[in-house]
Amino acid sequence: MDVILEIKEKFERKNQILFDKKSLFLQDLIFLISEQNHKVLTLWVFDFIEEIVSYLESKYPNEERFRIALNKTKLWAQGEIKMPEAKRAILDCHAVAKELTNKEDIALCHAIGQGCGVVHTIGHTIGLPIYELTAIVYKSGIDNCKDKLIKRKKEYISKIYYYQKHYQEYKKWAKFYEKN
């Protein structure tokens, strides 16, 4: 099935989130994610979250919760703070979405929150692309988003391969990463 047809079906059902774990468009990415270790996926999401945070900060220069969530999550991944402190920051970032009306920005807030959750469990990994790709659709429109979605998915895949080769360069990890 074509990605646009998938999106249109979700849109007609009035779904706010236009992708999910069953989306045919995401199956190759989901498979690739399933083969990665926790460190690779953590670095991968941090890379994309940084981009999203910078974008949202340009739109909302007085809003600090995006950056705080990312920074505290990085500290958690390094073992510098405990989960409750990072979790609070992540939930605060999700809360920003309830204060906004722009569907693209709402989805991006949730992309950050889901991405940050990867430190806790790799099951959150696919949440970042699900929400970010949804934001791309809202920004570009259903009829103009296909090339942007394909390009972004290629970027996701490329960065996974990058971090597969380079994750061992990062030495500061919380103890719970030791099994990787």
Image (tube, helix red, strand yellow):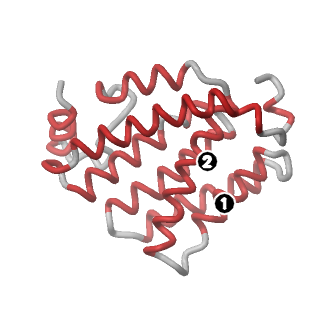
Q: In this view, does 147 lie above or below 93?
A: above
Of residues 2 and 65, the one nearer the viewer is 2
Residue identifier under label 1 = 89
User: x%, y% of residue 73?
Assistant: 70, 52
The amino acid at mark 2 is Phe
Q: State left or right for residue 179 relative to residue 108.
A: right
User: x%, y% of residue 97?
Assistant: 45, 63
10 Å crowding of disc 2: few (<14), some (14-19), many (20+): many
Residue at horizontal 31 percent and vertical 52 percent from the top: 136
Q: State left or right for residue 111 relative to residue 104.
A: right
Quadrant of the rendered structure where residue 13 is?
top left
Badges 2 and 1: C-beta atoms under 8 Å apart? no
The amino acid at mark 1 is Ala
Residue identifier under label 2 = 46
Q: Which of marks 2 and 1 is in front?
A: 2
Residue at horizontal 53 percent and vertical 53 percent from the top: 112
